[in-house]
Image (cartoon, grey):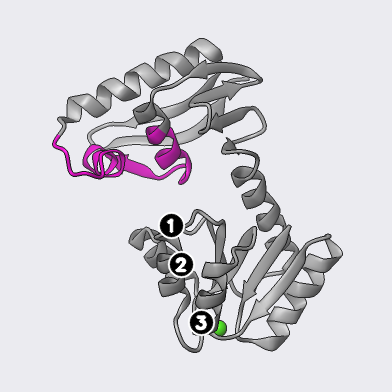
Amino acid sequence: MHIAIVEDEPKLASLLENYLTKEGYTSCVYRDGNNALDSLKNNLPDLILLDLMLPGLDGLSICRELRKSSDVPIIMLTARVEEIDRLLGLEIGADDYICKPYSPREVIARVKTVLRRTTQSGAVQLDSRFVLNESSASVSIDGQEAAVTAVELQLLKVMSDKPGQIFGRAQLMGRIYPDGRIVSDRTIDSHVKKLRQKLSALNDSVDCIHSVYGIGYKFEIIEEV
Ligand code: CA
């Protein structure tokens, strides 16, 4: 696995590099935003650690630019915790955010988690029991599999990408029907209802899509014990 580190502080960059090497990853470092984007576009790594503030293009622009053509896993590194909220609000599509100062150990743990979630032939491991498989349009819990429709798959993908975040119906519609097609709130409700039926048929002790009264839905895996 090859990790690109886009970080202009040499000490931090080499610290990360050392830890990644110890964990068996190869890595390369970019210190300038413009160089990073040019090179990354043509030569995608398995994951990118992307600092927000950089000389040249900033991390935000790099992330946006890469997302136009790629789903490469991106972990954003920011200097301020308040930045994370702002970045989340902008929906730039990073896979995770880490605030400085961070311990390299924490970064490695997040790298592993993100890679686990995003690798393996379109299969996304949502938790130890729950797998979303895009290529076969199915979900599985404890190895039991159920087929889902394209819309249901998209719903799950959008919501599970931000566990705990509440999505309004309009927001979900915008993400699921990006062509701007007008569908009623009831359409989303009925897709969610069918999806929940499929999931509870697979395993009724795992509850993952929750309605939030008056607002919409959120994804959070809650296992009954
Ligand atoms: Ca920086």
Question: Would you say residue 2 sits in the magenta stretch?
Answer: no
Q: Earlier in the sequence, mark 1 or mark 3?
A: 3
Q: Quadrant of the N terminus?
A: bottom right
Which residue in the rendered view is the most extreme toward the top? 201
Q: Residues within 10 Å of mark 2 (few under 14, many from 20)?
A: many
Which residue in the rendered view is the most extreme toward the right? 22
Q: Quadrant of the C terminus?
A: top right
- Residue 193 placement, left or right of 69: left
The residue positioned 49% from the left and 83% from the top of the image is 34
Asked which secondary structure carries label 1, the reply is loop
Disc 3 under 8 Å from ligand 1? The reply is no
Which contiguous range is marked in magenta?
154-182
Residue 104, how many percent across, how many down? 73, 68
Residue 12, how many percent across, how many down? 69, 81
Contact, mark 1 vs mark 2 (Cβ under 8 Å): yes
Find disc 3 in the rendering and name its residue: 33
Q: Amino acid at mark 1?
A: Gly
Q: CA distance from mark 2 to mark 3?
A: 11 Å
Q: Residues within 10 Å of mark 3 (few under 14, many from 20)?
A: many
Residue 178, how many percent across, how many down? 26, 45
Contact, mark 1 vs mark 3 (Cβ under 8 Å): no
Asked which secondary structure carries label 2, the reply is helix
Looking at the image, residue 49 lies above or below residue 156: below
Please tell me the numbered disc located at residue 79.
none
The residue positioned 69% from the left and 80% from the top of the image is 13
Q: Amino acid at mark 2?
A: Cys
Query: Which quadrant of the view contains residue 167?
Result: top left
Find disc 2 in the rendering and name its residue: 63
Q: Earlier in the sequence, mark 1 or mark 2?
A: 2
Contact, mark 2 vs mark 3 (Cβ under 8 Å): no
Q: Residues within 10 Å of mark 1 (few under 14, many from 20)?
A: some
